[in-house]
Image (cartoon, grey):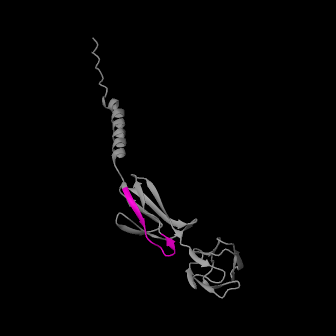
Amino acid sequence: MSKPRRRRRSSVLPFFIPFVVVGVIVAFILLSGSSSGPGTLVVRAGYGGTFIAAGFTVNGATFTTPANVTLPAGDYTVDFAPLSWYATPSPQSVTVPERTAIYAFGTYTPISRFVGISSSAFNSTTISALHGVTPVVWVNRENVPVTILSSVFSEETIDPGQSFSYVFQSAGTYGFQIFGGASTLTVNVQ
């Protein structure tokens, strides 16, 4: 007689391994998707394509541009600090998302210095400007053309009601006169 065949028990473990692996992967995806992380607020400041260092506050802390600030996800207000020679940008509201960068840019606008002129006089005798930044604007308040003389641009004739703007490229002291007038203007450029 032959012996009854013994049934080989196949292991159940290899059958469950793929299900366990898939379950671990799904659990990892679900858990990592629900976890939150901080975001980054990238803050820059400048004017006319030029970056400048400017102070700002966010969430009660003070920083200087350029800066990358790590923050919990949420809503924030970026307040830019005043900067000499520039108009201060308005505060910006930003929403920082989780694990993402959001940008805020403060556009500083140079503050112009205005000089009123008539056919015989300037309305100021001395003004200050920042070289490469501050526009100095001469405004003709007369109903006839007025010519201003200087070593910077020789002469400039300004028609009635019109203006002429100039940004000094070098620091120094510059003098101006009105053609035919006795008034002088000194522009101190830093």
Q: What's the residue at 35%, 56% (across, down)?
A: 72
- Residue 86 belongs to the span the image colors magenta: yes
Magenta-colored segment: predominant secondary structure: strand
| Residue furthest out toward the top | 1
Q: Nearer the viewer, residue 125 or 121?
A: 121
Tell whether 1 sits left or right of 26: left
Provide residue 131's location: percent of width, then percent of height. Answer: 59, 78
Provide residue 11's location: percent of width, then percent of height. Answer: 31, 29
Q: What's the residue at 63%, 87% (across, down)?
A: 184
Give the vertical position of 147 relative to 62 (above or below).
Answer: below
Q: Is residue 186 visible?
A: yes
Q: Is residue 173 visible?
A: no
Provide residue 77's location: percent of width, then percent of height. Answer: 39, 60
Q: Nearer the viewer, residue 67 or 16?
A: 67
Q: Nearer the viewer, residue 116 or 45?
A: 116
Q: Nearer the viewer, residue 48 or 41?
A: 48
Quarter of the image for the C terminus: give it: bottom right
Which residues, given as a range, are shown in magenta? 75-87
Which of the 4 image quadrants contains residue 127? bottom right
Give the vertical position of 129 relative to 90 (above or below).
Answer: below
Q: What's the residue at 63%, 83% (across, down)?
A: 121
Provide residue 2's location: percent of width, then percent of height. Answer: 29, 13
Quarter of the image for the N terminus: give it: top left
Q: What's the residue at 36%, 67% (across, down)?
A: 61
Tell whether 126 sits left or right of 150: left
Which of the 4 image quadrants contains residue 151? bottom right
- Residue 181 belongs to the span the image colors magenta: no
Tell whether 120 sits left or right of 79: right
Which of the 4 image quadrants contains residue 40? bottom left
